[in-house]
């Protein structure tokens, strides 16, 4: 494997034509090195680690160019490689601190009181006493009674504190749908817990 | 129609998270039915996977979390040189190859 081979690689990988028929490997790197590096940066890695992991990702890109699917976008393909590099790195580390963690539903109402956004924590709101165990149980029951999509919207909002736009992206629905579902969820919970 | 559509048992990993490829399939609207529902339920409870999906949606627009992470044009050029050197010299020491800023590309031959 040599540099000349690297420079010829795009000609052998027809799928890369998605961003330009004569796209070169170097161009791919120049275009996507930053977002890939920032992808790792957002997961708590140091700048040096990000550069190492970015390099690892693009080695994977180089090796996979021939197999790149024509119907996939370059970004999606790059993301798949980067995310797998990240997961492999996490797996190889022992009990490393990660940004994300699984949050069981059972723990929903047992947190620090930050589970509800401001609109649901008004002083005269019946949900204001969420931290009381009895109400927490009621809330869990009420959540369980919500339609699935409504419950998902609410949990993403309350538990992960995502923005409307982010909830829409996660659930593959429109922002208007998210707003509507959250409004209805709030009304149902108000009624249920009043 | 994609083969994944309606599949009940996607490639959930041993650690309980869906495979990256499964998230990508969801992003591409290639999951439906129970597989889609189950993945959505996982995303609601798993901040890690939800964030992964959001980064997939917005990869090109990602900004560095700090200035220390921001790559300059010179950084990108140096990283590119190191990458090419690594691909060119697979037999070289990994430790050396990974040090973008302190090691020049190994000379050919």
Image (spheres, coloured by chain):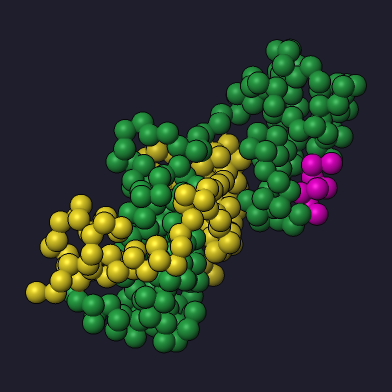
Chain colours: A green, B yellow
Q: What residue is at 70 percent from the left and 22 percent from the top?
A: A113
Is the residue A94 above or below the residue B95 in the image?
above
Judge from the rendering whether residue B22 lies leftward or rightward of residue A170; answer left or right: left
Where the N terminus of chain A falls, by quadrant?
bottom left
Q: What residue is at 45 percent from the left and 42 percent from the top?
A: A44
Is the residue A49 above or below the residue A20 in the image?
above
Image position, residue A63 (x, y; %): 29, 69
Is the residue A14 above or below the residue A192 in the image?
below
Image position, residue A144 (x, y; %): 70, 30
Res B34 seen here? no
Compare residues A194 and A33 and report the one nearer the observer.
Answer: A33
Snapshot quadrant of residue B31? bottom right
Q: What residue is at 36 percent from the left and 31 percent from the top?
A: A95
Q: Main secondary structure of the magenta part?
A: helix
Image position, residue B85 (x, y; %): 23, 68
- Identity of the residue furthest to the right in this view: A124
Snapshot quadrant of residue B28? bottom right
Span colored in magenta: A176-183
Can residue A181 be found in the magenta stretch? yes
Judge from the rendering whether residue A162 lies leftward or rightward of residue B6; answer left or right: right
Compare residues B68 and B19 and report the one nearer the observer.
Answer: B68
Judge from the rendering whether residue B26 lies leftward or rightward of residue A175; answer left or right: left
């Amino acid at each position: 494997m040599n540099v000349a081979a690297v420079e010829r690689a795009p000609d052998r990988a027809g799928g890369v034509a998605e961003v330009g028929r004569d796209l070169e490997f170097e161009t791919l790197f120049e275009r996507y090195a930053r977002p890939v590096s920032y992808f790792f940066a957002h997961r708590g890695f140091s700048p040096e680690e990000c550069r190492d992991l970015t390099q690892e990702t693009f080695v994977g890109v180089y090796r996979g160019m021939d197999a790149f699917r024509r119907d996939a976008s370059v970004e999606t393909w790059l993301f798949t490689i980067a995310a797998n590099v990240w997961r492999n790195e996490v797996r190889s580390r022992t009990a490393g601190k990660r940004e994300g963690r699984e949050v069981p539903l059972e723990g929903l109402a047992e947190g620090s009181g930050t589970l509800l956004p401001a609109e649901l924590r008004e002083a005269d709101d019946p949900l204001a006493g969420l931290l009381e165990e009895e109400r927490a149980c009621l809330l869990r029951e009420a959540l369980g009674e919500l339609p699935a999509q409504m419950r998902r919207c609410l949990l993403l909002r309350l538990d992960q504190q995502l923005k409307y736009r982010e909830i829409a992206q996660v659930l593959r629905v429109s922002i208007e749908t998210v707003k509507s579902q959250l409004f209805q969820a709030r009304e149902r919970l108000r009624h249920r817990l009043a | 129609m994609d083969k994944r559509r309606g599949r009940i048992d996607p490639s959930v990993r041993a650690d309980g998270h869906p495979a990256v490829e499964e998230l990508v399939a969801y992003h591409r609207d290639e999951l439906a039915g129970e597989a889609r529902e189950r993945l959505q339920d996982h995303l609601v409870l798993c901040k890690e996977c939800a964030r992964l999906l959001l980064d997939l949606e917005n990869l090109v627009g990602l900004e560095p979390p700090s200035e220390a992470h921001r790559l300059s044009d010179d950084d990108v050029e140096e990283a590119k040189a190191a990458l090419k050197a690594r691909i060119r010299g697979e037999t070289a020491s990994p430790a050396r190859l990974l040090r973008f800023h302190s090691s020049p590309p190994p000379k050919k031959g």
